[in-house]
Image: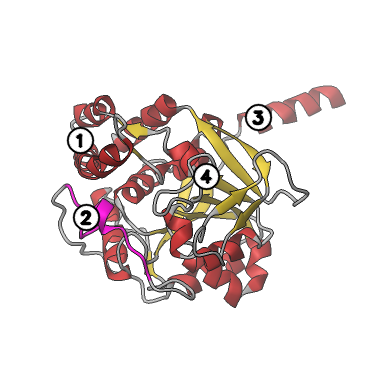
Amino acid sequence: MDIRRALSHFSENRSRPIPPRDIIIDTDPGQDDAAAILLALASPEEINVLGITAVAGNVPLPLTSKNTRIVCELAGKVDVPVYAGCASPMTRDLVTAEHVHGKTGLDGPVLPDPIMPLQDTHAVDFIIETLRSRPTGTVALCPLGPLTNIATALKRAPDIAGHVQEIVLMGGAYFEVGNITPAAEFNIYVDPEAADIVFKSGIKITVMPLDVTHKVLVTPTRIKALRDTQTKVCSAMADMVDFFERFDTDKYGSNGAPLHDPCVTAYLIQPDLFTGRHINVEIETQSDLTLGMTVADWWGVTDRAPNAMFMGDVDAQGFFDLLTERLARL
C-alpha cells in the first residue's frame, strides 16, 4: 500500500504543470531587445514578467524607456509595468549604438508613440523592492543591455544578492572577442565597472555571449518565415531586423545579422537549445586596450573558481522556430 501511495504521489507530481518563472527584464531597446521582450511576453506558460526596467545603452535613457513601452504596446501587453533606470554608466560617459540601431533605437517599422505611462518608481528601487518582497530565490534578473541598473541595485542593497534566483544576461564574448572594440562586446564595454560588480556578486549567472549570438543569424529565409505568419508583430519584427541586419552583414560578410538578446528569453523557455561550460569570467576595467573584455577561462588554465555558465553553442534553427512560433501568437 505504501508503495502504491508513493507511486501515485510521484505520478501526480510529474503531471503537475511547472509554474512560469518570475523575471525582471532589464533592457535598452534596440531591435534585438524588442525581439527578446516580445518572446517573453508571448510565453506566459514559461515566463511571468514582473516588470521591465530600462537602462541607457543602445540609445539614451529617454529613448530606451520609450522604446520599451512601444514594444509592450505592440504586443498588446499594456499592463506590464515599465520603469526608467540609470541614464549613464556608474563611472564613465555613455557610449551608444545608433550606428547599428538607428537614431530611435527601433528604426525600421513605423510604430506609434506609447500611451502607457512610465512608473514613478526608479528602476533600481523597483529591483530592490521586488527582490526583498518576494520569497528568496524566486525571481530571475534578465539583463539585455549594460549592467548599470543591476550593479547599482547590488551596490545600494547588497542583501539582495542572496534573493536572486539567477541572472541570465546577454553580454561578453570569448572566441568572437569584441564587436564595439577589438576586445570587448558592447554591453560589457559600456559599463565594465557594473559588469565587474555583477560577475563578482556570487549570484548564479548564465551568459549568452557573442559566441552564441553570432550563430543565430537572421537570414532572408528566416525573415520570410516571420513575414509569412502575416501577423502585425511578426511583420514589425521583420522590418526591424531588415533595418539593422544591413550593418552586421556589411561588417561580418555573413548571410544575416546576429539576433543577440532573445537568446536570453529563449534559454528561459527552452534551455536545451544551448550548451556551454561553467567557467570563471573576469571583467577588464583598467586597460585602455582591452577595456570591457570578458576574460573567460574556457580552457580551465587558471585556478580561479567558476562563477558563470558561459554558453558556447546553440541550435540556431530551433531558436528561430521557437521565436517565429511564439511571436505569431501575439
Place of residue 273 in the rendered image (x, y in percent of width and height, measured from the top left): 51, 30
Q: Is residue 232 magenta?
A: no
Q: What amino acid type is highlighted by mark number 3? A: Arg
First along the sequence among labels 3 and 4: 3
| Residue pointed to by mark 2 | 102
First along the sequence among labels 3 and 2: 3
| Residue pointed to by mark 1 | 231
Disc 3 to disc 2, C-alpha distance: 48 Å
Above or below for 155 versus 198? below
Direction from residue 141 to residue 66 in the image, left or right = left
Disc 2 to disc 1, C-alpha distance: 24 Å
Cβ atoms at labels 3 and 2 below 8 Å apart: no
Q: Residue at x 31, y 58 (%)?
A: 97
Cβ atoms at labels 2 and 1 below 8 Å apart: no
First along the sequence among labels 3 and 1: 3
Residue at disc 2, secondary structure = loop
- Magenta stretch, overall SS: loop
Q: What amino acid type is highlighted by mark number 2? A: Gly
Disc 3 to disc 4, C-alpha distance: 16 Å
Q: Residue at x 34, y 30 (%)?
A: 325
Crowding at dot 2, Cα within 10 Å, few <14 / some 14-19 / many 20+, comes out as some
Disc 3 to disc 1, C-alpha distance: 36 Å
First along the sequence among labels 2 and 1: 2
First along the sequence among labels 4 and 1: 4
Crowding at dot 4, Cα within 10 Å, few <14 / some 14-19 / many 20+, comes out as some
- Magenta span of residues: 94-108
| Residue pointed to by mark 3 | 14
